[in-house]
Image (spheres, grey):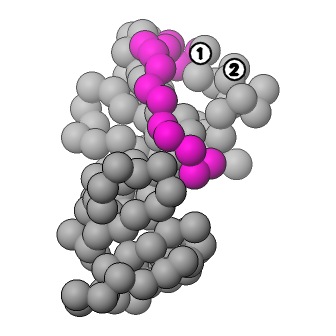
Amino acid sequence: MWYYVDGKERKGPVDESMLQQLFQSGQLNDDSYVWKNGFANWTKIKDVTELSFSLPSQIGASTSAPSLLELVADKKNIFIRIGADRGSIPNDYGPFSIDLLKRLFNEKRINARTLVFTTGLSNWTLLGDFADFQE
């Protein structure tokens, strides 16, 4: 369960979906503070990687999703962040090749909500934002 600061008032507990609704409605923003059990201090939403709804989209206004394969070619330089989509402390792993990433995806060991980072991206991006990994 999450707690958040609204103005000067601490509110909660709320679940992550309610926090997302508050964010999408504009009541909370990237600079709003949140806390949950296990956090040492109140943290800005933009600094909480497990709240992926606050991550900026790296895709842009394209009508079709880009291909991660085109972005990385045959390089073994893709990193993944898991745990954020499950509400636990995120862990980073890699580097992986595109082939290994596809195998992990097909085996359902990672999913569309897994965050990825590689050369050409300015921030962690949801794997499902790429055409090669849409479920």
Quick check: marks 2 and 1 in contact, CB under 8 Å?
yes
Which amino acid, mark 2? Arg
Which amino acid, mark 1? Asp
Can residue 107 be seen here? The reply is yes
The reply to whether the magenta stretch includes residue 98 is: yes
Can residue 130 be seen here? The reply is no
What quarter of the picture does the N terminus occupy? bottom right
Residue at 50% in and 13% down: 97
Q: Secondary structure at mark 2?
A: helix
Front position in the image: 18 or 100: 18
Residue 55 shown left or right of residue 91 in the figure = left
Residue identified by numbered label 1: 99
The reply to whether the magenta stretch includes residue 68 is: no
Residue 40 shown left or right of residue 111 in the figure = left
Measured as percent of width and height from the top left, residue 132 is found at 58, 37
Q: Residues within 10 Å of mark 1 (few under 14, many from 20)?
A: few
Residue at 30% in and 62% down: 42
Quarter assignment of residue 22:
bottom left
Front position in the image: 34 or 22: 34
Q: Which residues are magenta?
A: 86-99
Residue identified by numbered label 2: 103
